Amino acid sequence: MRRTFPAVIVILVLAGVSARAHHSYADFRLDQKVTVEGTLDELKYANPHVVLKIRTAEGTVYSAEWQAASWLQFYAHVTLTTLRAGDHVIVTGAPSRDPASRALVRLKEVRRPSDGWTYQVVPEPSIEPPRPRR
């Protein structure tokens, strides 16, 4: 029992570090937004991520990583049939630091103009810290 408890703590800490590293966005410019418009070539809908492959009118293919599949399904009501290959979409997200990778993460908006369907991240309200009284 004395050896088991420290081992469990070490495993939990390492698992937390691993999960955080998996979701690192160091290769992306989170302070910028890029909008890509095109045809949805492919939709990979599997936990932990949903990945959209979008082909622009010029033939360039972008990869856009959406939220976790389970989160989208439960909170945003996005299902397996919400988007389909062939849909014309407009996607806004944070671009990669390497423009050649043509990747976006942290999608802020996904739109399908044909019927007006939109997924949009609602920004959290800014809360100002209380000011000291004089």
Image (tube, grey):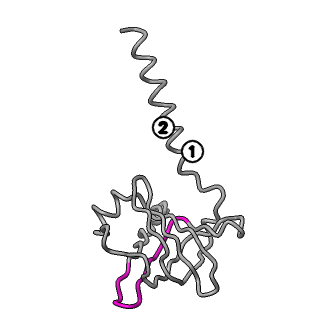
Tell me what residue is drawn at x 64 percent, y 86 percent.
58
Tell me what residue is drawn at x 41 percent, y 70 percent.
125
Q: Does residue 24 lie above or below 130 as drawn? A: above
52 part of magenta stretch: no
**Magenta span:** 105-118
Task: Locate residue 130: give its quadrant.
Answer: bottom left
Farthest residue to the bottom: give it: 114
Q: Quadrant of the N terminus?
A: top left
Tell me what residue is drawn at x 50 percent, y 78 percent.
91
Residue that mark 1 sits on: 21
Amino acid at the residue labelled 2: Gly
Q: Nearer the viewer, residue 53 or 10?
A: 53
Please state if 50 lies on the left or on the right of 32 as rendered: left
Q: Does residue 118 lie above or below 21 as drawn? A: below
Q: Residues within 10 Å of mark 1 (few under 14, many from 20)?
A: few
Residue that mark 2 sits on: 16
